[in-house]
Amino acid sequence: MPSTMQALVLSEPNSMAIREVPIPVPGPNEVLARVRAVSICGTDAHLIRGDYPGFWPPSFPFIPGHEWAGEIAALGEGAERYGWKVGDRVAGTSHDACGVCQKCVEGHYNLCENFGRPGLHRQYGHNYQGADATYVIHGMKCIFRLPDKLSFAEGALIDPASIALHVANRGGVAAGDTVAIIGAGAIGLLSADASIARGAGRVILLERNAGRLAKAASLGFEVVDTSTDDPVATVRAMTGGLGADVALECAGVPAAVQWALGLLRRGGRCAAVGIPVVGVEIAMQRLVLDELELVGSRASAGEMRRVMPLVEQGRIRVGEMITHRFPLVEYERALATFNDPASGAIKIVVEP
Ligand SMILES: [Zn+2]
Ligand SMILES: [Zn+2]
């Protein structure tokens, strides 16, 4: 076992380098994993740009990365009691919550009331060192056995797949529902599959990027090009004037939230996973008089294990999302590709 590893180290916003750093030592109920694949998330791009100053990351130097898979390289004290052993293949997720507060006890660990408190809560790759490295430490609550059938690259997408299943769950998608999804990035496309897994009758994806529209259509979904067509009027026309039963907002811009509410059927429900950085004006009259529901959807809460068989059976098609692969040493090129709307990138997998 070497004593140092390669890691993507962020020294300040937009300033990063591949460095040789000490391999961390796993503490009680933690494992050290050899990272085999880590995928770039929209949150990584924001975090690296410095969009969450003082929060994600709380300080520098910092190693980002939170959507990963690999194999266990060493066990911290007590980890073996949970059945883990060196060599086990695992997929990771980021929320390592306290497990003790009321929200954690009730299963809503994504809403942990001790969020960010040192020693009580960690979010790997956000407020604690992440997986853009050859090794990473994770607590017991954040690793999940990766089925043999799934590759490490697919395993890296279990975390975003769990987030997609969570937003479909928060939307309350029921058998036969018409679901409209704003944004055909990875979360939008994966939540389209998650909606079908929950029994949706129709899934309509709204998007303006030509490459993503083509991707959504190639996966078998109905599409609306928001660069040429009015999103609300088009979805209403497609649904006999009634609107969609459920809207999933996966774009994170104010207009998308307004469209999502505007295209809902009376009594419809919108779950929002996109995070606009500014306030959004909401048509409260319609929300009240048509009894619309608007709920937030943060990360996942229990879906990591539940999404695994759906991915294994090809019902949530994570492999279809992977458009590019890079070695860790080419992270900056991978990130530039991710940030280029003309690149056709959906998910980029980096292999340390
Ligand atoms: Zn992510
Ligand atoms: Zn908690």
Image (cartoon, rainbow, N blue to C red):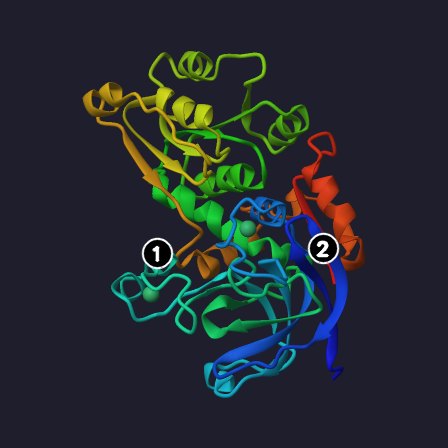
Instruction: Find residue 16 and name its label.
Output: 2
| Image coords of residue 121 (percent x, y) | 41, 67
Q: Amino acid at mark 1?
A: Leu
Left or right placement of residue 154 versus residue 309 in this view: right
What separation in Å lies between label 1 and label 2 (alpha carbons)? 30 Å
Place residue 4 in its image quadrant.
bottom right
Decide which of 250, 337 is in the foreground and name it: 337
Tell me: residue 208, above or below residue 183.
above
Tell me: residue 94, above or below residue 53.
below
Q: Amino acid at mark 2?
A: Met
Instruction: Find residue 3 and name its label.
Output: none
Decide which of 266, 38 is in the foreground and name it: 38
Q: Residue furthest left?
A: 289
Left or right placement of residue 206 versus residue 214 in this view: left
Give the secondary structure at mark 1: helix
Q: Residue at x 71, y 68 (%)?
A: 134
Image quadrant for the C terminus? Answer: bottom right
| Image coords of residue 70 (percent x, y) | 65, 67
Q: Residue at x 69, y 61 (%)?
A: 9
Q: Is mark 1 within 8 Å of ligand 2?
A: yes
Check disc 1 and report the residue beneath it. Answer: 111
Decide which of 86, 138 is in the foreground and name it: 138
Tell me: residue 80, above or below residue 38.
below
Give the secondary structure at mark 2: strand
Q: Are marks 1 and 2 in contact (CB under 8 Å)?
A: no
Tell me: residue 294, above or below residue 28.
above
Place residue 293 in its image quadrant.
top left
Place residue 294 in its image quadrant.
top left
| Image coords of residue 329 (percent x, y) | 80, 58
Q: Residue at x 76, y 82 (%)?
A: 2
